[in-house]
Amino acid sequence: MQIQVVGGLAVRLGAADLSLGTPKQQLVLALLVVRANQLVPLHDLVDELWPDGPPRSAIANVRTYAANLRRSLDSCAGDRLRIVREPGGYRLLTDESLIDLHRVTGRWRHARGLMRAGEPTRAIPLLEDVVRDAAPLLAGLTLGPALTARREAVSQERRAALELLAEAHLSLGRPESAVSLLRDEVSHDPLWERAQCLLMRALLAAGDAGGALAVYRAAREALTDQLGVPPSEEMERLRNAATRARRRIPESAREVETIGSDARKRNWLPRTVMNFVGREEMVDRLLCEVREASGQGPTIRVIDGMAGCGKTTLALHVASRSAERFPDGQLFVDLRGHSARTRMRPAMALETLLRQLGVPAGRIPMELPDRQEMWRRQLATRSVLVVLDNAADSRQVEPLLPVSGSAAVLVTSRRRLLALTERPPVSLTVLSEAEALELLDTLIGGGRVEAEPEAARRLVDICGCLPLAVGLAGTRLAHRPDWRISDLVDRLSHRSMFLPGLRAEARSLMEAFAESYEPLDEACRKGFRSFGLAAGNHLDTAMVAALTDLPLRDAADVLDELVDRHLVQETSAGRYRLHDLMRRYAAELARQEGESTARRSAVENLLDHVLHSVVRASASIEDGRVLAQHLRLAEPRRPDLLAGRVNRDLDWLEEQRPNLDAFIRQAADEGHEPMAWRLARASWRFFYIRGYFDDISATNGVGLVAAQRCGDRHAVALMHNYLASACVRTGAYQDASAHLHEVVSILTGLGDEPGAQRARFNLGAVHWLTGRLHQSLEASRETLRSSVLDTLPVLPNLGLTLRYLGRYEESMAVHRLHLFVARIKHDPFHMSNALGHLGGVRYRLGQNAAAERLLRASLALRDRTGNGFARAETLSDLAGTYRQLGRYEDALRHHEAAIEAAAASGERHVQAQARNELAVTLGVTGRADEAVLVFEEALAIATRIGHPYEQARALDGLAGHLAGKQPTEARRYRQRALAIFERMGAPERHDLRRQLAEPSSPPA
């Protein structure tokens, strides 16, 4: 049996095709197939079949179509292809390998992985399969919004596969194959600029500079005539290369072209050692290779070796000495590869690197492939040096590597990473005896090495000439000026311990660790071992007190002693961490010297303390009653440790951000599931207001699994609910809907109707954002009637929905009530929101003076209280108000501020809204060409996330600018916009109907 969706829809049983019924019945099957094994809600099927507005019998019709399909499939396909009805929708159960689309997608993923692994020869057959069939998805059917979006996504995947196939041919020195592949595609789509650039590269590689210039001229003409934009910088570089090639300029006379970057210099390298010792030959070679980085491609060098041999020190020394060659930035990220539990995911590493480059958080994509593309695009035009420290393996590093440009990357790892570069790695061994002695002399000074040369040689021999061990022993002597070197040698000669995994001269390293550890009293030993129990990247005094069961003051004294002995590093006031080798040493000691029940109790104490600390720190941003209801917390185990925690301490939460993820994962991994989901829930509000949606998805995803494991269905519902919040803010509306339907289903089954109603209210936000305004309106009204929520969070949603429906007087009344209740409750957060929403209604009514007063008052209150929520929307409405007042400079300034704020907050629907408003102002001020580009940006964003209202606004705006030159295209845009507005019931539909009823004017 085969299921076909590429091309037309078909279900083949042997040589025969199954009859699939009417076109609408086929659409039901099509949506179920492309979402195979997923629940497809009824409302999605209704929207797909009747995008312009469903009939009253829509749900009954959908059920009929589904029943017909079930009968047909049951009689012919049996268990291989079944449609099952579930609460809220239908699910198609099948082996996804039977579906041609899934097979193609699988080949595409495999091919990308092979290309990233540097295996283009194996990738080419897979890519050829992907690009072979150019037929559109579900050809012959009139699709609704979801399947149209999927058809476009499949088309874009094929384009990306074709680009990658051309890259593969070029990497193997087969430019002729790339040329034959690209010529037809480029001729059918002259605006496909990436393919045009690849074709130019292939022609240049084949020696046809004239052909490359011809491609450039055709592309420039198409881009200028149809889009009004010049060719890209990459295309201009290729044109210059082709021009030089035709003129036969000698290579030595060519100058490397660089693209100016507006990025200010950013140096994120940690502090390096002042007196670097040894490795002269390696340093000189690396400096030469790094400084020769050029536009011919990135320079990637791997430094490997055993733990403690100085890999990071060498990389930072080379990076600091090369910094002036990389004016666009020197970046650093610790990949934490020494532990699978704390290992940094490539997506998080890319977020860190992009933020170091200055990319706002809201502009960083959610998915790893998109982040990787943005990172490589950024590095293609910048001169940047990157240090990737402590890599676990090649798979962790490969997504972080540039593929073009003049960046230099230094990677350090304890493992040999042979797949990253064709050059062999720089493998560090221990220091020579002379270098180790020089290091020891640098550390202890005072002529002590010269005074005891034999003892000094014995000491570095015991340390195995390993830099970390020599450093620890030297520091010990430096703090004891009365000791002779031979005294320490005698002590080390009579100690023996075992530290698994460190073998080359490892006994000497363990002796150095033991010499620092064994003199400690029991409290200090326990404090040191406690660092081996916790997954976080740092601990504070109260956390150590929780782990050790010591009073807070005693824990502080223990930490002071450990810092003095250089066993623990104090990274900032009150924050402590161990070097990764020391952490492993501490973990080994904890395993050897403690019962498993004692270790488990210590971790429980830590997690309990962190949970109560998060609750206390979140007091200013979280409703305490709701949080208490959700968490069902017992009293803290150590209330004395909370005395030092400041209520409403968002700075502390910011500092703990990396720890929270680690602690939640540790709780789930080590059998503390109730702590895992509670910590995820307690952290949610902070992550949400700061725009850390990756963190919400990661922590609540772990929390969901933990809640399922411990069988707490209320907790499962909570995790689904807060996963939905991240999906809503990032435009993943279908995922948000699926999570919230799960919440409704679970809580209904538990008899928690108030909780289920709250989830339905949250679904109302999804309905509003996806254009189902009447469903959103009913969700808000039903929530108010049921009194399951305080009125404050319900009123703004209700008022906004009424505004989008054009019921402005009712919207004003609701927002006034919102402001009144917020004032009574002294809630500045809701007061500022209510003022902004009132101003938004006034702006849309043309009451500009009142709108300006309200909007400015809202912004002033936000600034005073630090409330950044919905700031971008308020700025956008104020910009529109200034436009209507004729204050165009003020309007443009506030439009730019709105776009910047929307990017920072990560709300993509607001990014579309702000661009639509800016485009209107540009059109009013006579900058029509710029307005068209901005409308197109808004349309692209709104289409990508499925936000129909801003889609329709962008289409209407584009139609207005095209009406004089392309009346047919303008009319088509208006018809599409009208269909959306009609489906939503938005007031803009009336004006559009009037415009479409008017006779068309001939082109100017």
Image (spheres, grey):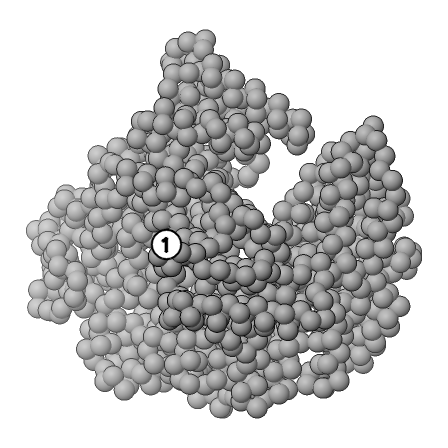
| Residue 148 at x, y percent in the picture | 58, 52
Residue situated in front as seen by the camera: 139 or 415? 139
Looking at the image, residue 454 sits to the left or right of residue 41; the answer is left
Looking at the image, residue 660 sits to the left or right of residue 47; the answer is left
Q: Residues within 10 Å of mark 1 (few under 14, many from 20)?
A: few
Q: Quadrant of the C terminus?
A: top right
Q: Quadrant of the N terminus?
A: bottom left
Against 505, residue 531 (above or below) is below
Q: Residue at x 37, y 19 (%)?
A: 206
Against 643, residue 898 (above or below) is above
Looking at the image, residue 891 sits to the left or right of residue 422; the answer is right
Disc 1 element: loop
| Residue 757 at x, y percent in the picture | 65, 82
Residue situated in front as seen by the camera: 920 or 321? 920
Q: Residue at x 76, y 46 (%)?
A: 974
* Residue 684 visible somewhere in the drawing: no
Q: Residue at x 74, y 54 (%)?
A: 979
Three-letter amino acid code of the residue under disc 1: Ala
| Residue 78 at x, y percent in the picture | 38, 70
| Residue 879 at x, y percent in the picture | 80, 50
Against 878, residue 778 (above or below) is below
Q: Residue at x 27, y 33 (%)?
A: 284
How many numbered marks appear? 1
* Residue 170 visible somewhere in the drawing: yes
Q: Which residue is mark 1?
A: 15
Against 297, residue 696 (above or below) is below
Looking at the image, residue 183 sits to the left or right of residue 669; the answer is right
